Image: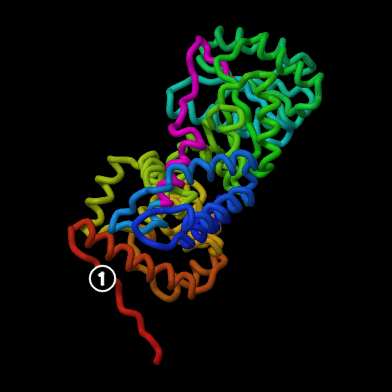
Amino acid sequence: MFENLSDKLERSFKLLKGQGKITEINIAETLKEVRRALLDADVNFKIAKQFTDTVKEKALGQDVLTAVKPGQMMVKIVHDELTELMGSTATDINLKGSPSVILMSGLQGSGKTTFSGKLAKYLKEKKGKNPILVACDVYRPAAIEQLKVLGQQLNIPVYSEDGNKNPVAIAKEAIRFAKQRGHDLVIVDTAGRLAVDEEMMNEISAIKKGIDPNEILFVVDSMTGQDAVNTAKEFNDRLDFDGVVLTKLDGDTRGGAALSIRAVVNKPIKFVGTGEKMEALDVFHPKRMADRILGMGDIVSLVEKAQEQFDEQEAIRLQKKLAKDQFNFNDFLAQINQVKKMGNLKDLAGMIPGMGKALKDVEIDDNAFVHVEAIIYSMTPAEREDPSLMNGTRRKRIADGSGTSIQEVNRLLKQFTETRKMMKMVAQGKRFTPPARNVRR
């Protein structure tokens, strides 16, 4: 996410030479490269020019502190302007009304149906809502079935009417149904439509008029770049939507949509989708996104994700086991599962300052834990409880059962032993020194 933009901005800041003040002479090449980086990221030309003009205005004549280099001062100014460009602060979703009604809109293939499921799960778990999903895509039978599958997976009811081709009537009846059954949130998934398709645009306008939603969200595939921004403007002219959702932000996206869309339609980005899993949904924080674009990481989001998976009672139990050197493979497996629930591994690593650049060309497979889990699941309950039972015969059986090699089993056992030793010493407040490696000369 934003890797190319981050690299090019970093290179542009290195061009800024000299001490004392930022002047038109020493800033010219840097601003030229910043604008080029934004254009390459598919940012609207007018916005890119306006952005660099504002940066130039704020930077010229800035006194540079002795401890700060001109390039560092420029990073600070660009960071502040990126934050401002994307909306300054996070914007909450409107959940007023009884029930609250949220209407989804967007192009075909933008990810509306998947996002509807993600949002229902998010609001159920984070806001204590009792949601119902409504299938109003009457043109694509697979969309109704997809929503039903998601609803079943999330244990959230889905309202649909077989044979009814009138989405306005379906949406109205769904709200009446929700009131009867005590649901305080209705999420209406609609058909994808092109902004140039007058009949389909009239239809979603009629749905809006018929159900008077508290919130209209425009779902856009961030990989479509500048086209996404143009489409957003067309939809906003018709629907006057309340917020934008950027999906597929974990893909090979240049980021232009995230940087341009707020300025073009003057509506906040409220959520971003960062993967296929139902947990892969984040509230959009402009400052945190600016941090990540400029390679500063996003520790706050990383901590928040960790806290979501944190179980205080489990932590106390684990600490006692660590102090007594009783940490076993069942505990190890539980820790792996907690990390997996936090989301995409490369995305998580990118939240650590400096790690995004370090891992740029490194492929981190989300299935990296598969072999480890296979080895642990091939152990007997007694072996998981007491790793000291492992002998040559047991290791061979585990390797055969997990489809791995004895070397891989041995490697895991060694890593586990070192991890347990480290965690025990940390729990006791001692300093851990990794074992020395043999180096061939």
x and y, in percent, of residue 35 in the image = 58, 50
In the image, residue 321 above or below residue 271: below
**Front in this rendered view, residue 249 or 225:** 225
The C terminus sits in image quarter = bottom left
x and y, in percent, of residue 424 in the image = 24, 60
x 44%, y 53%: residue: 23
Q: Amino acid at mark 1?
A: Thr
Which image quadrant is residue 176 in? top right
**Front in this rendered view, residue 385 or 61:** 61
**Front in this rendered view, residue 193 or 55:** 55
x and y, in percent, of residue 278 in the image = 55, 37
Element at badge 1?
loop
x 48%, y 18%: residue: 95
Q: The magenta stretch spans which residues?
A: 74-102
x 54%, y 64%: residue: 362
Q: Is residue 300 magenta?
A: no
Disc 1: which residue: 433
User: From where the camera sits, is residue 231 visible?
Assistant: yes
User: From where the camera sits, is residue 367 visible?
Assistant: no
x 54%, y 29%: residue: 119
Q: Is residue 75 magenta?
A: yes
